[in-house]
Amino acid sequence: MSLSSSGVALSSPGRAQPLRVRVAARRPVAERVEEFVLTAASGDPLPAWSAGSHVDLVAPSGVVRQYSLCPADPGVYRVVVERRADGRGGSVSVHDDLAVGDETWISLPRNHFALTRALEYVFVAGGIGITPILALVDEARTAGRPWRLLYIGRTRAEMAYADDLVSAHPDHVTVHESRVSGRLTLSDALTGSARGTAVYGCGPAAMLDAIADACAPQPAVDSFTERFTAAVAESVPNREFELSLAMSGVTLTVPEDRTILEALDGSGVVAPSSCREGMCGTCETGVVSGEVDHRDAVLSPEERSENESMMICVSRCTSGRLVLEL
């Protein structure tokens, strides 16, 4: 297992080691929103990544949070952090305590929001949800596919890069300030999308639900979303089950009132984790056997049906016995 300087587990046997990074620059890009440019503390280029990727970042307080990677020069990472007083303190610590020249740890990039092939794209960003969308827009442009962006926020002053996007792509970007123009009805904005359109959204849960509802009845229009909070899923009632770890030979019982991750913690088995809400993908673990009740906001319906991996911080077993690659 590898630990950050704060003692936070970012990797374990079989997983890639975390990266030590230095803050090369930071600047405000909107109200309560700061941009951080990260370079490898070793001086080597940081690994390549794909549009839609995010990294775990250890805040000075020790809290680990996930941030999407924004377009940047090769070998350099750029993340954007909104200061949120209602969270677990990670963003506040990053804003207040992570200065230019400081070092911290990040994970290697992971991608659960990659751009699929489509005839054209519609991107919908709500507030800080613009961060993964920026790289997806760049990839769509590079592919030469038609695209448009609908960027929604309370006020323009709170919307990172809004002016830059409109200036660079005036015919493709629409900025909607809800405090000025009222609430936007997404069904009106998305209805009538051409067949073969892929709609990508990142933002508040209500916005993402509205995107799914607007796209569902349209033929050959698919929606893909990335959430700030885990979706509420319809699951079977919690039941106790037996858990076996194929690699370590450990067998234990997961009671109905504890998650797999909590049971492992209680047994002294270390597994990588971060959000513990089924959102970030850090705890994704391979499934050897057993039926999984998926409760995360990471895996696609197709990935869930394959039953090859699960998020052990929230998902459970419905078959009485589960064997994991741990």
Image (cartoon, rainbow, N blue to C red):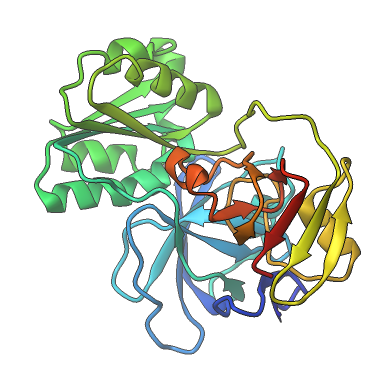
State the quadrant of the N terminus: bottom right
* Nearer the observer, 224 or 154: 224
The x, y position of residue 118, in whole percent, is 19, 39
Q: Residue at 65% x, 26% y: name it.
A: 234
Q: Can you say whether 135 is above or below 227 in the image?
A: below
Looking at the image, can residue 271 be seen? yes
Q: How many marks?
A: 0
Report the residue at 43% width, 10% height from top: 182
- Seen in the image, is 247 located left or right of residue 310? right
Residue 154 can be seen, yes or no: no
Q: If the image is split into quadrants, where does the C terminus sit? A: bottom right
Q: Position of residue 143 (x, y in %)?
A: 13, 51
299 left or right of 270?
Answer: left
226 versus 38 height, above or below = above
- From the top left corner, tell me how far across and down residue 193 is, in percent: 20, 20
| 180 in relation to 262, above or below | above
Q: Quadrant of residue 318?
A: top right
Q: Picture coordinates of residue 228 (x, y %)?
A: 56, 39
Asked if residue 189 is positioned above or below residue 43 in the image, the reply reads above
In the picture, measured across the screen, residue 241 lies left or right of residue 55, that is right
Which residue is farthest left?
A: 144
| Residue plotted at (88% across, 55% down) | 253
